[in-house]
Amino acid sequence: MKATGLISLWTLVSLPCGPLANPAEREDVVKHAIKLHRGKGAVITQRKQWVLESCRKLSGLLRQKNVVLNKLKNAIRAVEKDAGLSDEEKLFQVHTFEIFQKELNESENSVFQAIHGLQRALQGDYKDVVNMKESSRQRLEALREAAIKEEMEYVELLAAEKHQVEALKNMQHQNKSLSMLDEILEDVRKAADRLEEEIEEHAFDDNKSVRGVNFEAVLRVEEDEASSKRNASKREVEDDLGLSMLIDSQNNQYILTKPRDSTIPRADHHFIKDIVTIGMLSLPCGWLCTTIGLPTMFGYIICGVLLGPSGLNSIKSIVQVETLGEFGVFFTLFLVGLEFSPERLRKVWKISLQGPCYMTILMIAFGLLWGHLLQIRPTQSVFISTCLSLSSTPLVSRFLAGSVRGDKEGDIDYSSVLLGMLVMQDVQLGLFIAVMPTLIQAGVSTYSSIFKEILRILILIGQILFSLAAVFLLCLVIKTYLIGPYYRKLHTESKGNKEILILGITAFTFLMLTITELLDVSMELGCFLAGALISSQGHMVTEEIMCCIEPIRDFLAIIFFASIGLHVFPTFVIYELTVLLFLTLSVVIMKFVLAVLVLSLILPKTSQYIKWIVSAGLAQVSEFSFVLGSRARRAGIISREVYLLILSVTTLSLLLAPALWRAAIMKCVPRPERRSST
């Protein structure tokens, strides 16, 4: 068996050398290898002779390769000493020799890698799947590295070709006199070359050796426009491939974010088409929902369902659409803060702080109880409970738009309580995102490290509380010293030109967003605080800014709700409709009951009647459960099935929210004070 293995080994080694022999010899080699493999007509002496000849050929090729390498080194030294060659010509010739050296060395490495791979395969057990998987992984990595090296060699050849063209141009310019225009164009060409070298980022070379970077095989799908050009040259088609789509082995799709040549403007046509399609289809969907008495936001969600993966699957840039939709959340919360003055926040701050905390604790307690009964891991129970305890701030903000602000003189306004509790939930969202890494580690930790994990969670909570204190202290300074002069300057500069006012307010909102993000607090809280700070300047200021920002908010909110629809899967809901309806009703009823219970304990007796409205506003699941669920699924906290259940329950709870809100308003608000916004 050992002799047969060695014969097969050297047979494979000699096959790469076949192109150097004539066709007749190649055919004899192949026939002889087949006979040896089948064990026919091969005596021991012939086998030994075959091994010796194969070894002799391989050693001869290696000696020949060393001779060629020495000649190339001498040629490089001769070129460098040749005074008759220009610098460009020297660079081109040396570059060409170095590329040929690399080609010889890589060919030798490939031979011995093949030998090593065959030896490893012969030593392995064909029944051991783990060993076969490891061998396959090693071969895949070797192929990836070979592909990367070949790609680098191709790029170097292109560079060598460019140097050759430069050398020829210099020789032509030396042999003829240039006109003034030719001299100007030559100077411009050199300046353009310097510009490309300065702005070009060698991202591939800089990051390929970074820890955590893996080589992957991808498919490049060309655009239809590029592939349909009949008269385009190959070079023109290659230039158009910058906006092609890349697909990896995990079916993730990628598009260009930054081109190599930044001097050429480019546009993502897929993203443009997606936004145009969403804008056109949102109109009939929103119109239909208005006709049947539903909020227009459900029309936008239906638009996303129709265009998303579960519908026509026409949205190509899903991540880009979701990113743009996040700005709809930012501006929605800014306008919420604009209507929610600090004076009103001061009246309900105790309720806003206590209510969400009590509800979250109760939800986690019920989750752990049900998890214990259903034998669910504690980390998964805590995550699901916390995720379901959050409510949708953008949805409730649309419910409250233009609604009544106070029912009785001296009573607490239900909108103030509701928005205050939602803002506190946004703070809890930032806290939970910060604690998620610890929650992931807790799922694999042993009982001996529980104390360390608890200590780590307490430290994280302390950091978040410190960040919140820093944010509110900064808001106090801005409100006292900065916001007044800043707005007066904007108002003075924007007379007859609203552009400066819109830009100034947007920049201030993004500044607060950045500050809260740097302090590890949710960006949404920064947008809300920006609106609250500006609202402290008075009612007239609020009305002026609202007229400017509302159209921007409305358009971006359409994109946001449509991006939610991209993650709604009607087929899954239909297949599991009974289970999903039961789960959704259970979550909605539980949140409503817990909210009523908590508010009954913390609300003043004179304002007990608003607990029904506030509880109805909180009895749904926040759309941010999509974000938390996706992170938890990638981290292994929850399974794919649990993730789909969370998405479906969230969607159905959002669909039930308008009916519950309308019922609460009709029960608790007198008829003359009801507004059409409900």
Image (cartoon, grey):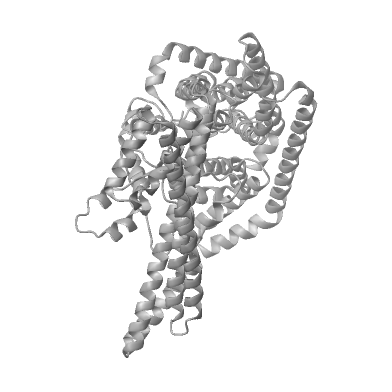
Relative vertical location of residue 672 with respect to residue 562 in this rendering, above or below = above
Q: Position of residue 211 (x, y in %)?
A: 61, 47
Q: Nearer the viewer, residue 5 or 536?
A: 5
Q: Position of residue 358 (x, y in %)?
A: 69, 23
Q: Residue furthest bottom?
A: 177
Whether residue 452 is visible here, answered yes or no, is: yes
Relative vertical location of residue 477 with respect to residue 78 in this rendering, above or below = above
Whether residue 623 is visible here, answered yes or no, is: no
Relative vertical location of residue 443 with respect to residue 402 in this rendering, above or below = above
Q: Position of residue 93 (x, y in %)?
A: 43, 72
Q: Residue furthest front?
A: 45
In which image quadrant can residue 406 be found?
top right
Q: Nearer the viewer, residue 283 or 29?
A: 29
In which image quadrant can residue 155 be found?
bottom left
- Number of numbered markers: 0
- Identify the residue at image location x=47%, y=68%: 71
- Identify the residue at image location x=71%, y=23%: 602
Left or right position of 447 against 501 = right
Left or right position of 378 against 503 = right
Q: Nearer the viewer, residue 601 or 626?
A: 626
In which image quadrant can residue 162 be found?
bottom left
Left or right position of 479 against 541 = right
Q: Residue furthest top?
A: 373
Left or right position of 372 against 458 = left
Q: Nearer the viewer, residue 55 or 449?
A: 55
- Identify the residue at image location x=64%, y=60%: 485
Q: Position of residue 417 (x, y in %)?
A: 63, 30
